[in-house]
Amino acid sequence: MLGEGILKGMAETAKNFAGSFVSVDRLTTVEYPEQRIPTFENARVFPFLVYDGPDWAAGLRCVACQICEKECPPKCIYIEKSQGKKPDFVGKPQFYPTRFDIDISVCMSCQICVEVCPFEAIKMDTEFELATDNRFGGLLLDRQQLAKSNEYYHQIHPTEATEVDARLDAEKEAAAAKAKAAAQAAAAKAGEAAKAASAKPAPPTGGED
Amino acid sequence: MLATPASTLSVPFIVDQVFVLFKDWLVSFLPTSWRPAAGIVLGVIGIVCVYPGLFALTTVFERKGLGRMQNRYGPNRVGPYGFFQPVADGIKSLTKEDIIPFDADAVVHFLAPLTLVVTVFMGFAVLPMGRNMVLVNLDAGLLFFFSMSAATELSVFMAGWSSRNKYSLLGAMRAVAQMISYEVPLLLTTVAVVMIAGSLSLPKIVEAQSGYTGWFPHWYIFTPWGLASFLIFAIAATAETNRSPFDLPEGESEIVAGYHTEYSGFKFALFFLGEYVAMFSISGIGVTLFLGGWSAPLPFLNVVPSWLWFFSKVMLSIFVFIWMRGTLPRLRQDQLMNFAWKFVLPFTLLNLGVTALWRFMGEGWARWVVSSIILAGVYVLMGRVGMFKKHFGPRSYRYAE
């Protein structure tokens, strides 16, 4: 009959109207500043720099290779390379960035910098409350603002961070093993050389003997 | 003015007449010759304060109610439960820049919102809001009311025309087409009431409905012709106030905001106010004509003051407006016009005939049966004919699949 559909629709909205006061399950709204849902593990907003150990400046993994700067599509990264070197996590002397700026007003969160980084130094953050009243300086993040600890990385992306740590540990072990092997080889060589050196003058002594 | 001596005033009477007594007390400080004019001014002040106040309340209740219908909370940030939201909205619209488009006709652009608000408020002059609570008791009050509400079309067209914007003009054209189409059934339903009540004066129409048979009130909605008239009136009133599902004039998805696209700041707020106050006034007239005005639904409920009954009925009908807005999708222009001219108007004319029949069949149960059968039968028949060979169900697509 004419008007039947309207009545059905009105009944449906009335059911919602009354039901939303009775059952809390109907209300799916998360009242944001007070209530939050945890961010998803694969969420990504803007990049940050990972550091190991307690001191951010000493522990930065970045070696200022500038690959990310060159790959960045909107060119939002600016890096200045250091003059001197400092030891990296395996103890190898490496350059480090004296300046590392990301303009997050330009960044498009594409994650390409993360994918090209060979040193696991730049990762995506999940921090999204970045509003500021200064549209220029406030959105240009420097080295110190970008530096976040490895523990923080574990907190926001646990699976990924564990993989990265395993890889770095393997690298470290390999480096250590290589160093050990090299040291052993060197020691052996030195031993041989010492032997040879000691063997050469031996005949006269032996001859003497 | 009130003949009742002070010694016989009962408590319900004082509460019922509190505003009238207060006005008389205030006016008594003035010289006699000034009193009538001062009384009118006080009444106007009352109307101009009460309805914008109700408007503020309605905006927040509407947003909260719509939210609940969609399983949301609605606004709940400003003040307790978000009830100070209208204050924030008011401050916002007052402090916003008032833009007049470069090409616009500045004078007409300025006058349009004023015309709307003024004509809408004029309608309240003849509306009885309680026992003895009518500003001007005109003999042709109903006629005055509808001539004022018809003038809102003028303001809508002024706004659309003067903005010099295609969307404004389209919205205004739609609004005028819609409002004029639905004005006809709106007025014809009130003719039915006038035929039975025998007066165009609104207080007289309320009086005609104020009796009871046992516990049963003599409201016109409880008669077959009255129910049909009321439903048509409600449909036409929804169209007249541009409310969903007849909100084509401001269809956001098609024409931005219709005739008030080019309005900002306080002029926009005035349009907003005008639309809501028009809703109150059309609800008020609907309550007066069909729901017994300020009279109580049951005899013993007359203890409750009459003005409270009037405003409760108005707010109830506002709730139905909101409920419909939360339920129904917007019509298409051709559907709107077909509905107005092919269904509502013929049915209204039939209803006029049935009302005449009711009037001349005299007392008795026969007229109830006859008019109910005619109206219900024709309704079902027109529905069948109108929906004949129309497919209702999931939409099928020819190309996009």
Image: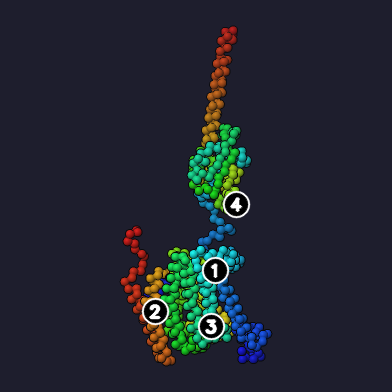
Callouts 2 and 1 on one subunit: yes
Residue B178, picture quadrant: bottom left
Residue A50, picture quadrant: top right
Pointer 4 chain? A
Q: Which residue is mark 4?
A: A134
The image shows residue A2 at horizontal and vertical percentages of: 38, 75
| Label 1 CA crowd tier, 10 Å (few <14, some 14–19, many 20+) | many
Q: Which mark is residue B345?
A: 2
The image shows residue B182 at horizontal and vertical percentages of: 43, 76
Query: In percent of the image, x 51 and y 71: which residue is there?
Result: B108
- In 3D space, how far apart are the residues under numbered discs 2 and 1 (Cα atoms)? 35 Å
Q: Which residue is mark 1?
A: B267
Camera-side mark, 2 or 1: 1
- In 3D space, how far apart are the residues under numbered discs 3 and 2 (Cα atoms)? 27 Å
Q: Amino acid at mark 1?
A: Lys
Q: Which residue is mark 3?
A: B126
Callouts 4 and 2 on one subunit: no
Callouts 4 and 3 on one subunit: no
